[in-house]
Image (tube, coloured by chain):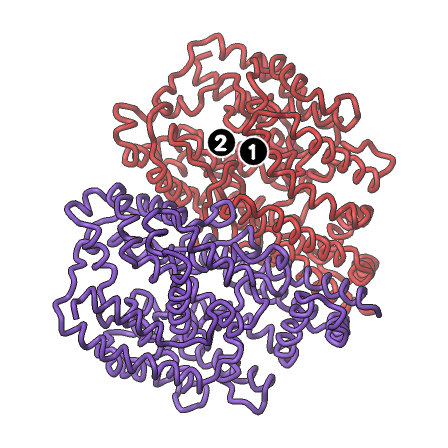
Chain colours: A red, B purple
Amino acid sequence: MTTQEALKIYREKTEQLHALGHAMGVLHYDGATAAPAESAEGRGKTLAYLSGCAYEIETSPEMLEAANWLNAHKEELNQQDRREIQVFLRENEFTAAIPKEEYVAYVELLNKADAVWHKAKQDSDFASFAPIVKDIFATNVRFDKYYKPDRAPYDTQLDRYEKGLTMEKTDAFFNALKERIVPLLKKVMAKPQVDDSFIWGKVYPTEAQRKFSDYLMEVITIDRKRCSIGETEHPFTTNFNKKDVRITTHYHEETPVYSMYSVIHEGGHALYELHTADSLEGTILAGGVSMSIHESQSRFMENIIGRSRAFIELIFPKMQELFPEQLKGVTAEQMYRAVNKAEPSLIRTEADELTYALHVLVRYEIEKGLFDGSIAVEDLPKIWNDKYKEYLGIDVPDDKRGVLQDSHWSGGNVGYFPSYALGSAYGAQMLAKMRQTVDVDAAVRSGDLHPITDWLEEHIWKFGAMYDPMELLERALGEPFDPKYFTDYLEKKFTEIYGL
Amino acid sequence: MTTQEALKIYREKTEQLHALGHAMGVLHYDGATAAPAESAEGRGKTLAYLSGCAYEIETSPEMLEAANWLNAHKEELNQQDRREIQVFLRENEFTAAIPKEEYVAYVELLNKADAVWHKAKQDSDFASFAPIVKDIFATNVRFDKYYKPDRAPYDTQLDRYEKGLTMEKTDAFFNALKERIVPLLKKVMAKPQVDDSFIWGKVYPTEAQRKFSDYLMEVITIDRKRCSIGETEHPFTTNFNKKDVRITTHYHEETPVYSMYSVIHEGGHALYELHTADSLEGTILAGGVSMSIHESQSRFMENIIGRSRAFIELIFPKMQELFPEQLKGVTAEQMYRAVNKAEPSLIRTEADELTYALHVLVRYEIEKGLFDGSIAVEDLPKIWNDKYKEYLGIDVPDDKRGVLQDSHWSGGNVGYFPSYALGSAYGAQMLAKMRQTVDVDAAVRSGDLHPITDWLEEHIWKFGAMYDPMELLERALGEPFDPKYFTDYLEKKFTEIYGL
């Protein structure tokens, strides 16, 4: 074999994997948006077949031989090719450790899980979902052990979402947050609460909200020829290539704010996918490098930009145009304070910037316990509720608004939650760095957000998965990650809003 | 090999082909409904890969050997297995005659063609579409010749859509129609025209039309858990299995009638797919047997049921509820006459029952000419317009409303058009047969259409592709197909409406 031959084989197989991934992605997206209720079984069979095909290609002697050849001759490769092979072999090592039947069975399990979770949530019936949770966690523990028999499975799980992340680091991170956020929240709660009554309880028609989504997408610089908006119960972003990205939202007629921040959050994910370098298209390096970096982008758009005073002042005239009756007599300043109301609440996706990390902490501790066996699935509702009482001081009235609220476990996204809190913290540090060269508020006020998106494209988006997340961050920030930027940011913002 | 072994291989490969077909179908559906504008290129690559996979399985020595073994031992097979092998080998003979690269190139061409046609239609610019038309027709001629070198390619093309159909038979069919329809249309045109002004020119909001669609689907007995409604420029039906059927419609706010009949027409297709026997699921025999039989079902629902006086009387109260202002003072009888207004027009999909077959005749003659070389693609706009003048007596103002109006050619559906006219004629003969045992009007008036749909399920739908279309028809009708049922039906209906 020559290096050119090996590259040819590797590229051909990569294209095949990309095509299969594309087809599976569209099947999932369609399943969540357009497919009729009873279609899940048929889709499950097709997904199982396609994922089996992908597994076979990924673990084929032909592809492995080519990749190993290239790895052994990396001095002949350019930087991108070298990185592709590194990432492929690393991921392949995980996949190849799993027996094919178990891999396919897991795909089928996940496909079934979604419908079970939906129904369980609807009925607030955790017991019907418990066997699935048990199966999904047990399978992940098993897979992690196949891959790294000598490491704690949850460390492997965290590392899969965020290269280099461990429980030790995550514990330290959450401790740093708790130390500052819990006392800050106490001070906030001692002050009079801001008034957000005007964004609730009136009717905000879906048709007008759809127009508002279109407007928001334009403001945050998304090219709609490459990114559509669908409607699903739980908003998400998916992408098939950089010309085909999809976000979804959910319109609640009682408030414009839920969908507004879903669109901006998912829009942040979409921007990342839409702006990775062209040279990475179709390779394993296309798209975001990790869940945390992804969440840093979505939460940067949602909170740091989307919940800034400048942003609300920018978009408020449009809100008043679309909802003239509903927002009569309301000012931009009132809206700014309303969308930043901080208080302990039940639902993570609706939580404010200040308490959000505490919601994540609950999930992190539970996942850790499920992985090391110190928590039993049957006890989850009670443990969940106890932790909400402990960290947020509130009582969970039912499992629908408790342990059943998130789609992550039924989707197999175990170990994902810490990414949200990490992402928020990364974003705050990016803001500090960005401010050294960009007048962020002025850009937002002008209505042209390109100085901001250009910075993100230049320092984060274009690199795709060229660097591991911590390296990417250090390159962008010029120093290692430090959660104090995030806690400083929160303290400054909420001190001002609540007059602490 | 044993017959059991051969069956096992054949079934396994069939399942794989079904999965690939499902994935490709969803990619197409998503492309027409949800995908962003610039997604076509990426989708084209993925479709090309998946269709290549399907081609390889279909023409694999393993599958062919198994099928040939089963064919040679058909006395050991049950009726369904025998039929599966017969249909598979027949279709395989066609596919296998095409070199793989040409097959994949054609899939890529079709994927590109759709966007080109859309733009050409928008701009009314046939020249930009002409090279694609040329390529698509030339490819079909070439494929037909690979398959049957000694037969006229258009005969092969017709036979592919409707087993046993030839130009000779189609000519005879259209001659029989022309003979009765042209003089009937002349008599109609000499009478005062019915008034349909109230279904045009007002605003019928999309939201209310969506509710109307839901109502219509329920009336025609469609199980929405297995069938969704999407929105596309050109309505269509697609299905992935009998629990996952999709129809689409297009809402025009200036009239409720366009979407109404799209929904009923596509609903007719959907009913057929939703009711093939469970035992056929996942096999080559699942779903409708041919385009003509399919069109017989969609046009039966759309025209014979949907444009009957009984049906309009049934649904008119709902129409008035949804469009109270727009339909103020209108009676069901006026609505019945309005939706049956007959007159020469430009657009096939909006044509009335009486003139519809003449639109199809134009396309049939053009396709025939393109296949035998007597018509050049460059001359299509002129020839199209000349034929509309000749058969329908009207002038075509632009190609958008002329030769560019249909999506069929860009979709590769060459030779499909005759199916529409044949389908209409089959449907009229089914009505005559059905009336021997079912009081069709009474069923419609009662609002419970099950006596009608039960008859169709029992005589048509459940059989899937168990019989070739002509055999299926004769079994259902108890006699051979005869277009006089259709011309009699038209004569009776329009004589009454126009008082001839």
Mark 2 and mark 1 residues within 8 Å of each other at the beta carbon: yes
Judging depth in this view, the residue of B268 and A25 nearest the camera is B268
User: Which residue ends up furthest to the front in the rendered image?
Assistant: B436
The residue that appears at 42% across and 55% down in the rendered structure is B452
The residue that appears at 76% across and 51% down in the rendered structure is A86
The residue that appears at 30% across and 44% down in the rendered structure is B208
Give the residue type that dot 2 points to.
Answer: Ile
The percent coordinates of residue B163 (x first, y second) are 53, 77
User: Which residue ends up furthest to the right in the rendered image?
Assistant: A150
Judging depth in this view, the residue of A496 and A173 nearest the camera is A173
Kindly state the secondary structure of the residue where label 2 is placed. helix
The percent coordinates of residue A400 (x first, y second) are 56, 25
Q: Looking at the image, can residue B42 be seen?
A: no
The percent coordinates of residue A276 (x first, y second) are 57, 51
Q: Earlier in the sequence, mark 2 or mark 1?
A: 2
Give the residue type that dot 1 points to.
Answer: Gly
Q: Quadrant of the C terminus of chain B?
A: bottom left
Q: Which quadrant of the figure has residue B421?
A: bottom left
Where does label 2 land, which residue?
A: A304
Decide: is B332 above or below B461: above
Where does label 1 land, which residue?
A: A427
Decide: is A156 above or below B364: above
